[in-house]
Amino acid sequence: WSSDVCSSDLKGPWTKYSGNPILRWDKEAAKSVGLVGTGHGAPFVCADGGYKYIFHAHASETSVGPRTSYITDFNISDEGVISITGKTIEPVIIK
């Protein structure tokens, strides 16, 4: 996932964010649990007011599916920079 551009005004001018993409295999949220093929997702607000991000990743380095969803921390700095950090929550399948 990437936060492509930033601006202090909705109408621009825009500056491309140098840290793109913010969610990828070699950054903390994916690397800590060995994820590859991290894909799009969605931020959401928790009951405590904090932000989390749910996203999917490939099954392995050699197989896309079945993809699984993961949840991690989603932060917005005072400067408006988005980061995805922290311990990634892995799903637990209950049968």
Image (spheres, rainbow, N blue to C red):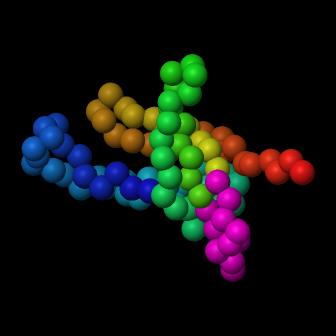
Indicate left or right for 35 with 50 as reference.
Answer: right
53 and 61: which is toward the camera: 53
**Residue at the extreme right of the image, as rendered:** 95
The percent coordinates of residue 61 (x first, y second) are 67, 75
Start-end of magenta stretch: 57-69
The percent coordinates of residue 69 (x first, y second) are 64, 54
The percent coordinates of residue 43 (x first, y second) are 48, 41
**Residue at the extreme top of the image, as rendered:** 48
Indicate left or right for 30 with 90 as reference.
Answer: left
In which quarter of the view is residue 37 placed? bottom right
8 and 59: which is toward the camera: 59
The percent coordinates of residue 73 (x first, y second) are 55, 38
Report if residue 50 lies within the magenta region.
no
**Residue at the extreme front of the image, as rendered:** 95
Q: In this picture, is 46 found above or below 29?
A: above
For the stretch drawn in magenta, the main secondary structure is loop
Indicate left or right for 69 with 44 as reference.
Answer: right
Image quadrant holding the N terminus, namely: bottom left
Report if residue 58 lies within the magenta region.
yes
Q: In this picture, is 54 found above or below 4?
A: above
**Residue at the extreme bottom of the image, as rendered:** 62
Image point (66%, 65%), residue name = 67
Image point (39%, 34%), residue name = 76
Image point (64%, 50%), residue name = 70
Indicate left or right for 22 with 16 as reference.
Answer: right
Q: Is residue 55 at least partly visible in the picture?
A: yes
Image point (68%, 72%), residue name = 65
In which quarter of the view is residue 83 placed? top left
In which quarter of the view is residue 21 placed? bottom left
